[in-house]
Image (cartoon, rainbow, N blue to C red):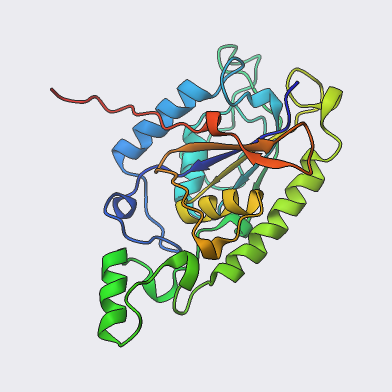
């Protein structure tokens, strides 16, 4: 018996994620390697016999940032409806009759929500952690900066991020998970209950921490690489017992390693 799940996917690699620069509101494209890896993730993890079963998805949430939306597009979920954002193709999605090899695989609606936008880095946008600490030291501020404890100057605090993510989690559970356990669980039934969230590194790590009620200020010590996939669910088939599914975190490496 399966409990509802939330699959969290960090957007693919960008130039700034590659070199450790904090990327909040800045719009950057995925690198060629980032696009390749996301395509491989979709091929490996999306399908009727894979981790993410499109027919079991009740809803898809995506960040307002283009890099997250491009990542969702590259996963090739086979959504029935158009994405609510411009895609690389202006043509309508194929119908099962016109393209039998690529039928619709999910009827889940896609919602763009600012609730899962990346942490607002404020004055730290575009800087690496070492640059932030050096800048603080030069201005007489404590140099041992930690985003989880200190937040960002002219940006968001841990309390700010906690508030918006707690509201998002509450809405998600009420809409898609309450009452969908047991015989109404998503897998293999007429009631899809899994949710897909495509967003960013810091905010998804914060989401995982808040999913299980862990305060951000203590540093949740979670890692989600660019293009990585994590899974949130519940223990004992109870919405009152949220948990992180350790067996459901994956990163697919599509790049060939040279000898």
Q: Residue at x 40, y 43 (%)?
A: 225
Horizontally, is 50 left or right of 147 in the view?
right
Q: Residue at x 26, y 54 (%)?
A: 19
- Where residue 161 sits, quadrant-wise, is bottom right
Instruction: Give the farthest residue toward the left.
Output: 259
Image quarter hosting the N terminus: top right
Q: Position of residue 144 (x, y in %)?
A: 34, 72
Q: Nearer the viewer, residue 104 or 23?
A: 23
Q: Position of residue 255 (x, y in %)?
A: 28, 28
Q: Is residue 68 above or below residue 58?
A: below
Q: Is residue 72 above or below residue 190?
A: below
Image quarter hosting the C terminus: top left
Q: Residue at x 45, y 64 (%)?
A: 25
Q: Position of residue 104 (x, y in %)?
A: 64, 23
Instruction: Give the farthest residue toward the top.
Output: 100
Q: Nearer the viewer, residue 65 or 160?
A: 160
Q: Can I make out residue 171 in this image?
A: yes
Q: Can I make out residue 151 in this image?
A: no
Horizontally, is 19 left or right of 225 in the view?
left
Horizontally, is 104 left or right of 156 in the view?
right
Q: Residue at x 44, y 62 (%)?
A: 24
Q: Is residue 183 above or below residue 120?
A: above
**Total labels drawn:** 0
Q: Nearer the viewer, residue 210 or 175?
A: 210
Horizontally, is 26 left or right of 191 in the view?
left
């Amino acid at each position: 018996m399966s409990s509802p799940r939330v699959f969290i996917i960090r957007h693919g690699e960008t130039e700034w994620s590659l070199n450790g620069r904090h990327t909040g509101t800045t719009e950057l494209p995925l690198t060629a390697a980032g696009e390749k890896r996301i395509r491989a993730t979709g091929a490996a993890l999306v399908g009727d016999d894979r981790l993410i079963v499109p027919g079991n998805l009740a809803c898809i949430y995506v960040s307002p940032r283009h890099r997250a939306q491009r990542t969702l597009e590259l996963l090739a979920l086979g959504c029935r409806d158009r994405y609510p954002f411009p895609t690389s193709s202006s043509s309508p999605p194929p119908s099962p009759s016109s393209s039998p090899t690529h039928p619709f695989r999910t009827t889940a609606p896609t919602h763009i929500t600012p609730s899962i936008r990346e942490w607002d880095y404020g004055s730290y946008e575009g800087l690496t952690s070492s640059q932030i600490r050096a800048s603080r030291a030069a201005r007489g501020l404590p140099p041992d900066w930690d985003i989880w404890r200190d937040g960002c100057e002219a940006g968001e605090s841990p309390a700010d991020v906690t508030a918006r993510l707690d509201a998002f989690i509450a809405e998600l559970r009420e809409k898609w998970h309450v009452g969908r356990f047991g015989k109404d669980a998503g897998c293999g039934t007429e009631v899809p209950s899994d949710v897909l969230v495509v967003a960013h590194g810091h905010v998804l790590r914060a989401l995982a921490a808040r999913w299980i009620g862990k305060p951000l200020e203590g540093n949740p010590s979670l890692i989600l690489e660019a293009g990585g996939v994590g899974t949130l669910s519940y223990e004992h088939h109870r919405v009152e017992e949220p948990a992180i599914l350790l067996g459901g975190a994956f990163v697919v490496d599509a790049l060939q390693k040279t000898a």
